[in-house]
Amino acid sequence: MKQKSLIAFCLVAGLLSFGQPVFADGEPSGLAVASDVVVGRPLCFLATILGSALFVISLPVAAISHSVDKAAHALVGKPAYATFTRPLGDFDSLTEY
């Protein structure tokens, strides 16, 4: 009898361990929006400027290797998206683009 209860307990514990917490996908908090405006956007804008400069410097090498599109997307496109297109306070989309 003791062994059956142990097996049942282990089975229930194993099934419960596969559960994922579910959170409502709502609007970002005020703190997230404020930190994005004060810290996030200026840093993304700086990354856009620096990426554009690096893209111009790397353009001859990228042209020779036929990777201008990849270099433009990585150095200019991603930071520009993070600066100008991404919704305020949405830090999750930084890793998706």
Image: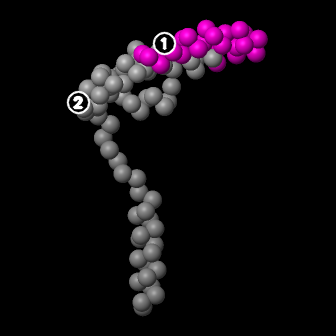
- Percent from the top left, x then y, of residue 50? 51, 15
Circles 1 and 2, Cβ within 8 Å, touching? The answer is no
**Is residue 86 visible to us here?**
no
> Mark 1 or mark 2: which comes first in sequence?
2
Q: Quadrant of residue 34?
A: top left
22 vs 49, nearest the viewer: 49
Residue ID at (40%, 53%): 20
Q: Position of residue 2 (x, y in %)?
A: 42, 89
Residue under the image location 41 percent in, 77 percent down: 9
On residue 49, which mark appears? 1
> Where does residue 26 sit, x and y in percent of width and height?
29, 34
CA separation, marks 1 and 2?
28 Å
Say if 87 sits above or below 3 in the image: above
Q: Which residues are magenta?
A: 45-70
> In the image, which is nearer the foreground, mark 1 or mark 2?
1
Is 31 included in the stretch rendered in magenta?
no
Q: Secondary structure at mark 2?
A: helix
Residue sitting at x 58%, y 20% = 74
Q: Residue at x 61, y 8 (%)?
A: 56
User: Where's residue 24, x and y in %?
Assistant: 30, 41
Inspect this view and state whether residue 15 appears.
yes
Quadrant housing residue 44: top left
User: On the image, numbered disc 2 is attached to which residue?
Assistant: 30
Q: Residue type at mark 1?
A: Ile
- Say if the magenta span includes residue 49: yes
With respect to residue 13, does 55 lie above or below?
Answer: above
For badge 2, the amino acid type reads Gly
